[in-house]
Structures are given as structure tokens and as C-alpha cells.
Amino acid sequence: MVRSLTQWTKTLSFPTRLSPNNKSAKEVSPTVTPSLSNNSLTASTVNNNKENNNTMNNNNNCSSMTEINQIYSDFESEKTIMSSVVYCIHHKEGCKWSDELRKLKGHLNTCKHDTLPCTSNCGAQIPKVLMEDHLLYTCPQRRTRCEFCSKEFTGHTLEDHVGNCGYEPLYCENKCGVKIQKRHLSQHKNSDCSKRLLPCRYCSKEFVADTLAIHHVKCPRVPINCPNRCDVNFLSRENLESHLKEECTISGCFFKEAGCRFKGSKYVLDKHLEENCQQHLQLICDVVNKQQNQITSLKSSISRLSLNYSGTLIWKISDFSSKIAEAKTKEGMELVSPPFYTSQYGYKLQASLFPYGNGTGEKTHISVYIKILPGEYDALLRWPFAHSVSFTLFDQTTCPDQACNIIESFIPDPTWKNFQRPSREPDSLGFGFPKFVSHEMLKKRYFMREDVMFIRVKVDPSKIVAV
Ligand SMILES: [Zn+2]
Ligand SMILES: [Zn+2]
Ligand SMILES: [Zn+2]
Ligand SMILES: [Zn+2]
Ligand SMILES: [Zn+2]
Ligand SMILES: [Zn+2]
Ligand SMILES: [Zn+2]
């Protein structure tokens, strides 16, 4: 709407608020010097006094006020005026704003041309409405303190300080949850942070610090002791298995054969041997006893195997001259033959010979006897023993046809105690010939040859005497 401005006076006055409900509204005093501008009103100067609505501008006087009041006495007119489109009062200085007059005041709050130099002399042009904020918060010349270190700064130097204050608490970038003053942060990250990376000192791989202990439990390079406590110098966990399989020197106790089941490396074994002398000695004694029994049993097995079941014994007596010499000095020295059986399940017999004689043959003859030994089958045999027994001293001549053997024989007397079933205890009693062959006779013919004599003892069951 274009309004003719020729009828306007130099200054205008109109209410600040154009509320239809408030006819006695107070008045504001923008002083406007209107000038024609195409189809809008240009307010070249406006003194916008918010706090003092009743104060008239200095340019106003009572008479002009009266005129205006007369001219715009009705609200309609005021409303119309306030709807007039005007430029910003700083139009000439470059503000491009243009809108209804009633919005001018609002615009001036933000119009960058409606500024004052900062009252702290920082050199900035500040919109008047923002001056207070500027002085408090943004003016480089303001005095302020760092909230962290409490040092005093000007606004300008604070800007440089912010972000560099060593006292500012910051969260650790490793997300360990620690909030720490910036000046301590690097030390924290290097040596305290639970989330810092640390190399495993064994395998050199990197781990978050608080998981390193868990890693050590399984790290394959961690050195460990051989469970056998062998002398290995260095053993890592990953090598244990092969060490135990291939290298570890475990040996059994030296007394293993005696029954000690201990096994261990050299070190432990030495200790074991030291501490178990008594036990080992006991084991050895047990072994000796066991072996003694074995020897006895073997002996009886061997003698059983070599037993003669034929009823005839050829008894070879070697080194006879030394035996006779021995018998001269040892009273009652008796040689005994290997035992023999009269048949496979028959009587068990043994011959004996006194080289220097016995009884009536003492010193002059060799005496021969037969003894009945306790046998395996005595319980099944007939008693007293009744087989005829003969002793033959062989003439070892090279011509058997011309041999002249000496033979003595007897048929047992059933009343004789010697022929009753023998007890388990060996019986020293025998029956035979104290004057079998004289020492003189022995020297004759070939009864002795190369100091060896042969005596045959023959038992003949066919001559059993019925009891
Ligand atoms: Zn403006
Ligand atoms: Zn300033
Ligand atoms: Zn600070
Ligand atoms: Zn941390
Ligand atoms: Zn490791
Ligand atoms: Zn080992
Ligand atoms: Zn042992």
C-alpha cells in the first residue's frame, strides 16, 4: 500500500502495542523522518526506547505531538501506519531488510548494522542487544577463569587454553573407564591403563593388560618345570609333550628287579635311593629267600630227573686215594651214593661207603651199606623191605672176560628195624658189609684205575621173601 507521505510531519509517534482491546495503550516514541521510497516508507532514524515508553524523543515537541495525535487519533490509522512497509533504518549502511513497520523493532534486535563497539574495547561491533552476553561470554577482553585449573584468562587467551588445560579431566581413550586429568593421561596410558597393550614377555604377542595374566596360563612359550623334575635346562609349555616322549630321562629304581616300583628322573631317583635303604634291603632279603626256595625246588627237580629207577646203581667213586687219606683223619667219614629207586614206583635206596672202614672193617677195609630212604611211594609198598641186595666191586681190566669182580649180597632179615618203612627223617642206619674189600685187595688187579673205583649196587625183586 502506498501512502502519500507529504501530509506526514517530520516526527511521528505511535503506540508500541496495537491491541484492539487496549484503547488506552501507552505510546512509544519512535521518531521517524519519513521519506518517499517507491511504494514503501523509509524510516531513516528510529530511536527505539523500550524502557521508557512515555518519554518522548528530543525531537518531539508538544505542538507536533498534538498534530500527530490529531492526525492519527484513531486506531485504524495507527494500524495502517504500522502495516506500512519500510526499510531498516540502516538501509543506507547496507541493510537489505524491509518489512512492515511493526516488525522494525524486532529486526533491530538482530540487525548487524544496529551495533555498538564493544565497551571492553575488544574492537568488535556488537548488536546492542547482545552486548551483555558478549561481555560475559564472548568478548576476547573479558576476564575469566579456567574451570579446571582455575587460572585467570582473558576471553582471548582462554580460547587458546581450552583444550590444552592439563587439569581438564578426560576419559581414557582406551575405554578403560578411567577419567583422569589430561596432564596424567599419557602416563596412565603407558603404565597404568588396564586396557593398554602389553607384549607377552614369553611369546611377544600383544595383549590388553588385564588379559595378560589369563594369557600366561595358556601361553605356549611360558617356561615350566618338567613334572619328572629331570635335568632339562629350559622347557616351554609347548615342548612339554615331546620332551616327555623323547627326552625326559625317567628310569626305574635300581631295585626294580627286587620289586621296587619307583620311577623317576635322575634327581628324584637319587633322593629315593637315599631315603629307602631299609626298604630296599628288605626287598633284597625277600628275593634271596625266594631264590633259596627256588634253588631247593630246582635241586629236587634235577635230582628227580636224574633219578635212577632201574634198581641197579653203578656208583663211580673218583679220587679215591685222597678220600681214603681224608677218612684216615676224619673219623666215621662216609661217602653216600646218589639215591635210586628199585623201580619207577618202588623203594628209594642209597648206598654208603666208608673208605677207611667202619665197625669190624675199620682201618683195614672199605665198608659198604645200603640204606632205605623215605620214598614217594612208600605208602603203596609192602613193608618190611625184602628185596635181595648185592654189591659188586668191578675189576676194570681191559679184558672183560678175565675180570674178577668182588660180589657180596644179602637177603634182608624182616625182623631188622632197618627194613621197616623209614620215617621222614633220614635214617643213618644201613645194612651191609663192614669188611667188603680189604685195603690190600684194593691195590690188586684193576679194582682201582686212575684212582677211580666202580661199585654196582643191585636190588633184585625176584628174590622177595614173603613176610
Ligand atoms: Zn537492519
Ligand atoms: Zn568485546
Ligand atoms: Zn585450565
Ligand atoms: Zn585407560
Ligand atoms: Zn605369550
Ligand atoms: Zn623331563
Ligand atoms: Zn626303589
Image: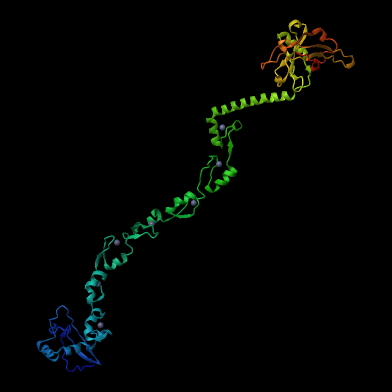
| Vertical placement of residue 426 versus 126, above or below | above
Rendering colour mode: rainbow
Check the picture and name the quadrant holding the C terminus.
top right
Outermost residue to the front? 467
The residue located at (14%, 89%) in the rendering is 74
Report the side of 54 relative to 367 (left or right).
Answer: left
Report the side of 80 relative to 319 (left or right).
Answer: left
Q: Is residue 367 visible?
A: yes
| Vertical placement of residue 195 versus 384, above or below | below
Outermost residue to the left? 62
Question: Residue 170: horizontal and vertical position, in percent?
Answer: 34, 60
Report the side of 191 relative to 139 (left or right).
Answer: right
Outermost residue to the top? 360
The quadrant in which residue 186 appears is bottom left
Report the side of 155 relative to 57 (left or right).
Answer: right
Check the picture and name the quadrant holding the N terminus.
bottom left
Question: Residue 25: horizontal and vertical position, in percent?
Answer: 14, 83
Question: Residue 214: horizontal and vertical position, in percent?
Answer: 45, 51
The residue located at (25%, 92%) in the rendering is 39
- Of residue 250 and residue 455, the one placed in the foreground of this image is 455
The residue located at (69%, 26%) in the rendering is 298
- Of residue 306 and residue 184, the one placed in the foreground of this image is 306
Q: Is residue 118 visible?
A: no
The quadrant in which residue 17 appears is bottom left
